[in-house]
Image (cartoon, coloured by chain):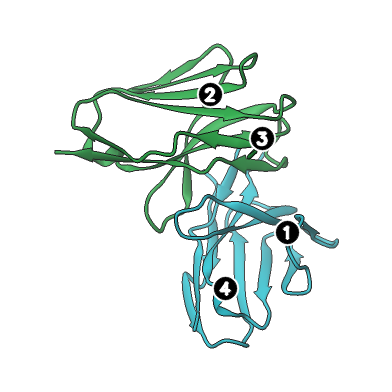
Amino acid sequence: RKEVEQDPGPFNVPEGATVAFNCTYSNSASQSFFWYRQDCRKEPKLLMSVYSSGNEDGRFTAQLNRASQYISLLIRDSKLSDSATYLCVVRRGKTSYDKVIFGPGTSLSVIP
Amino acid sequence: GAVVSQHPSWVICKSGTSVKIECRSLDFQATTMFWYRQFPKQSLMLMATSNEGSKATYEQGVEKDKFLINHASLTLSTLTVTSAHPEDSSFYICSAPGPPSYNEQFFGPGTRLTVL
């Protein structure tokens, strides 16, 4: 079993739709959680960190359930520019010097 | 934010040659850097952790004699793919822990290696 698993996708949604991505992780000792987006042939870019209390950044909302070892990302009012692969990332420690584990990613295409 | 650069951005080489990829932190010091590999339609896999002044730490299954890492200074780490073969064709990405005020890694733009 992979340490970080995500919906396989792809997700094809119309502009303006709400889309939710799910992620589960197997190592209960994991300390930090993130969502990254990766455009084709580019490096991953941090979208947002995920906190136990849940957090929101504009149209993006992230949730963490430590008991279920589950992370989610909700995108509201999808834009064409949201088309990308979304990577769930788990870090074993609390600092940026700790290793991170990338999930396999879920591809999103927002269609006009 | 902190910037990490990589060079070259892409390289095509013949089988059997060695290729060196550079990773630089441009406006901050990085005593540690991470090297990842990403095959098409797959996620990033950590290959090794590069440490300034000491040997790199390799992940299980990564051949240290094939993927030579040298962390020559506080701003430069290099990955050399020795005797490259077509199966080494991949997207290689480095990252560095950001300055103290940032709790995240900063990624280089990646190097696309194609071995013919």
The percent coordinates of residue A94 (x first, y second) are 71, 30
Asked whether the residues under the numbered discs 3 and 1 touch, taking CB atoms below 8 Å apart as contact, a structural biologist would say: no
- Packing grade of label 1 (10 A; few <14, some 14-19, many >=20) is some
Q: CA distance from mark 2 to mark 1?
A: 35 Å
At label 3, counting other C-alpha atoms closer than 10 Å, the crowd grade (few under 14, some 14-19, many 20 or more) is many
How far apart in space, not on screen, are marks 3 and 1 (Cα)?
24 Å
Give the CA separation, mark 4 to mark 2.
Answer: 34 Å
**Number of disc labels:** 4
The mark closer to the camera, 4 or 2, is 4
Residue type pointed to by label 2: Ile
Percent coordinates x, y for residue A63 in the rendering: 50, 18
Q: Colour of chain B?
A: cyan
User: Which of pointers 2 and 1 indicates the residue nearer the eye?
Assistant: 2
Q: Residue shown at 84%/62% (left/top)? A: B55
- Choose mark 3 or mark 4, whichever is in front: 4
Circle 4: residue type: Glu
- Foreground of the two, A98 or B74: A98
**Considering depth in this image, is B38 or A62 the residue closer to the camera?**
B38
Q: Quadrant of residue A111?
A: top left
Q: Which mark is residue B74?
A: 1
Dot 2 and dot 1 residues touching (CB under 8 Å): no
Q: Considering the numbered disc 1 on the image, is that residue within a helix, a strand or a loop?
A: loop
Residue B37 at what x, y percent from top left? 58, 59
Mark number displayed over residue A71:
2
Rendered colour, chain A = green
Disc with the residue nearer the chain's start (2 vs 3): 2
Inspect this view and state whether residue B102 appears: no
Label 2 and label 3 in one chain: yes
Task: Identify the residue at the far front of this view.
Answer: A1
Residue receiving disc 4: B87
